[in-house]
Amino acid sequence: MKTTLCRIAGTPLTKVVDFGRQPLGNGFLEPHQFSGEYFFPMEVGFSEDSMMFQLIEQPDPEKMFHDHYAFYSSTSNYMARHFKEFADQVLRSGYLVKDDPFIVELGCNDGIMLKNFASQNLRHLGIEPSLNVAREANKHGVRTCSEFFTEQLAESIVAEHGQADAFLAANVMCHIPDISGVVRGIKKLLKPTGVVMFEDPYLGEVVAKTSYDQIYDEHVFLFSALSIRYLFALHEMELIDVQPQTTHGGSMRYVLAHRGAYPVGDSVVRLVAGEQEQGLDRLATFESFRVSVEESRTKLVSLLRDLKARGKKVAGYGATSKSTTILNYCGIGPDLIAYISDTTPIKQGKCTPGMHIPVVPYQTFKEDPPDYAVLFAWNHAEEIMAKERDFMAAGGKWIVHVPEVRVL
Ligand code: TYD
């Protein structure tokens, strides 16, 4: 699915960065699958009308979210805590009716957030098109529906359960090319007093930190308060609060409601002013972003080549989807990075998409540590640094690429 028009405003998109041929970010594969591997040209565009930063082409969602989707949210303890806090905030927010509230989560994955509502016997429904992760959610007592969310699905949910008090999503909204269809569905699903609370990686952070690895096939959009406000305003909805999050290397939680239902908070006014100052409404900002991305690539590749020349062993830590963009954009393969360790069983024994670096179990990292480890899961740096004191004590060094390429 390629578009030359902004998915929100319908006006022409301007190409801002070209990442070349990219595979699926989560497309970990075995050697017998190499010959049929799927690639697409990954370019990003920006619209000064909607202020939406978006992929120009995106693979069909069916290629990415299916019954062997490799991403399980609950692999990180930190994320489990984060979603417990998110759920607690929803419960304390005052937006839910006291008597029998109904909570819907889009892309509930393995139930990491909804299980906090399920355990309190609150009415809930998780919408999760990837069957394997939805089954995992069911094991945690989370009720799911394995379909893509559309206006029609919203209507059938309302017919069966009534309207919702809260519509939640985490790291999901930015995945959906037909986001306008989702917002139309939300408009129907929400009670007049209902709220939408969702979070996604934040464009402001991506630009500030040159964390271009947030751009991959699944992230069709990177949002800002400006673009979210624009999108929802087209459907008579309003951004009423924003709350920065540290997850995924810098995310934003957006709270929206039907227009006029609640006052617009100062947090929105402040963030929007900050974004205008940062230039998130202007093409020129993304032209400088492209230059920073190119510089980051040059530095990372020359660092890895230099380490190789010095006979150092380099591995990767965390076979993230994000790493797929870095590896393929920079042309980094098994010659520069021997292996990537990852705790997710479904990724182990496979190879990384496109560059085919072996993904090994975490034990390999413990038993055969490298001299240098590229921290591809840099968004979990705090948790990982605390866990890997032995690696550092034994002289192991980390390589990070955000906010700039350096050895720690
Ligand atoms: P994630 O942060 O979700 O990144 P992305 O959205 O880019 O895939 O994924 C983190 C990956 O890192 C996941 O595959 C699990 C792995 N991981 C480890 O191997 N060890 C760890 O200590 C942590 C926190 C994550």
Image (tube, rainbow, N blue to C red):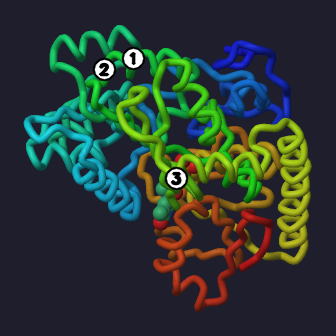
Give the camera-side residue of 91 and 111: 91
Indicate the secondary structure of the residue bearing disc 2.
helix
Label 3: which secondary element: helix
Q: Which residue is mark 1?
A: 185
**Split into 4 quadrants, where in the image is the N terminus?**
top right
Residue to which mark 2 is pinned = 189
**Left or right: 338, with 240 as reference point:** right
User: Are the residues at dot 2 and dot 1 in contact (C-beta closer than 8 Å)?
Assistant: yes
Q: Is mark 3 within 8 Å of ligand 1?
A: no
Q: Is residue 275 above or below residue 12?
A: below
Nearer the observer: mark 1 or 3; the answer is 3
Q: Residue at x 78, y 29 (%)?
A: 48
In the rendered image, residue 30, in percent from the top left (x then y), is placed at 57, 38
Hey, what amino acid is under mark 2?
A: Leu
- First in sequence: mark 1 vs mark 3: 1
Q: Which residue appears at 49% of the width and 37% of the height?
A: 239
Q: Residue at x 38, y 35 (%)?
A: 196
Please, what is the three-letter code of the amino acid marked with disc 1?
Gly
Residue 75 seen by the camera? yes
- Which residue in the protein does label 3 denote? 267
Separation of residues labelled 2 and 1 (CA atoms) = 6 Å
